[in-house]
Amino acid sequence: MVIDRQRYDESRLLDVAHLQFDIAAEHLGLDPGLRELMRAGQREFTVRFPVRMDDGSIHVFQGYRVQHSISRGPAKGGVRFHPEVTLDGMRALAALMTWKCALLNLPYGGAKGGVRCNPKVLSPAELERITRRFTWEIAPLIGPDQDILAPDVNTDSRTMAWIMDTFSILKGYTVPGVVTGKPLEIGGSLGREAATAQGCVFAIREAAIVSGLDLEGATVAVQGFGKVGFHSARLMAELGARIIAVSDSQGGVMAETGLDVHEIRAHKQATGSVVGAPGTASLTNRQLLELPVDILIPCAIEGQITADNAGRVRARILAEGANGPTTPTADDILAERGVFLVPDILANGGGVTASYFEWVQNTQKLFWSEEDINKKLDSVMTRAFHEVYQLARSEGVHMRTAALMLAVGRVAKAKQLRGVFP
């Protein structure tokens, strides 16, 4: 089958996810029926539930939980609270989680969920009631052997504690393994806070080795200065790289001599943005993406590098800390220009890998040191990177297609081995 790219709208994350899958499936020569099944996903649950607000009024919220695949194990994926949460968005992100877990060879399928709301206008008490009621609504679908939740956009360890407590009340006993990313005091894992960034930096290290780039003195720009962006910048600086630009949703700052990421973080905490940090020049998010740096790490939102600006990206290595920051057409442009892409399902796989470690610790009722966790994470990320790199070279495809070929192939094999019922 020849893929007609005109059928896909690359401004829509679900279309991007479908196109990426179809490209990999075509290279693998997947059976059409199996391809249709894997492309569509397995389960979708939509809930509408009432919550009493602080002023006494009742507001009805809508939420989703999508389980894209459970062929390789229980579903795994985050929960986000955001005004733009949609079913299509959850479908796309659940599929990405399936491929990410398979690529890293974790015994999970992919899931994603969320509630359409604006956390910025909600009180902590309202957020807690929303979280607990949403948990109650999706409780039949979740559990440590069914679907394990984790933090995502606008959710955190506190949110996970509320989910765990609500689910445990329903079951009548404590079930720490229903979520990962929870506080240490109730079964969380050391190293989880920086795990996504740490995994990304391990992948960048390997990309630098195969590209002949010395990280000592290498220039770095980071788009997005939340948890992943800050820790990515911090860890790269600790390896000797020079962080010359960072940004958030309000804009960015740069300094050719290098930024002190701790000072930038303190400024953001004090003012709400990195913009205006002392001793820096201002720039836009678009300008940051086009800086002549050795390493570009987009850690913000999807759809940042497209056919419109990919030709102006001048980084040697582009490591996707965010999900879906680069469109398929942009992938081709970057590959033609020799930009070394570390795709999202590889680059930001450290978070779900650390979540797996937390789940294992909960299941076995034991806990590992942070040093042990980082060693295990390094091993998983390094192995996955070189599996993708070798396949990309042997098949003559770019890194994203190679990563998806490995991931889709593993899920397809699991499905074939399990067979079709009845």
Image: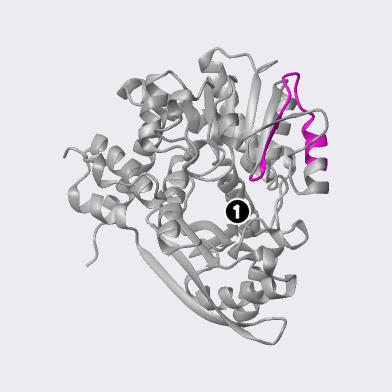
Label 1 crowding class (10 Å Cα cut-off): few <14, some 14-19, many 20+? some
401 relative to 420, above or below: above
What residue range appears in magenta? 249-266
Mark 1 residue element: helix
Q: Determine which residue is flagged by label 1.
A: 360
Residue 10, percent from left and from top: 36, 44
Residue 328, percent from left and from top: 37, 36
Quadrant of the snapshot with the C terminus: bottom left
Residue that appears at 38% across and 52% down: 14
Report the front residue among 402 and 380.
Answer: 402
At label 1, the amino acid type is Val
Residue that appears at 66% across and 34% down: 375
Report the front residue among 184 and 118.
Answer: 118
- Is 46 part of what is drawn in magenta? no
The reply, left or right, for residue 211 in relation to residue 196 is left
Residue that appears at 33% across and 26% down: 397
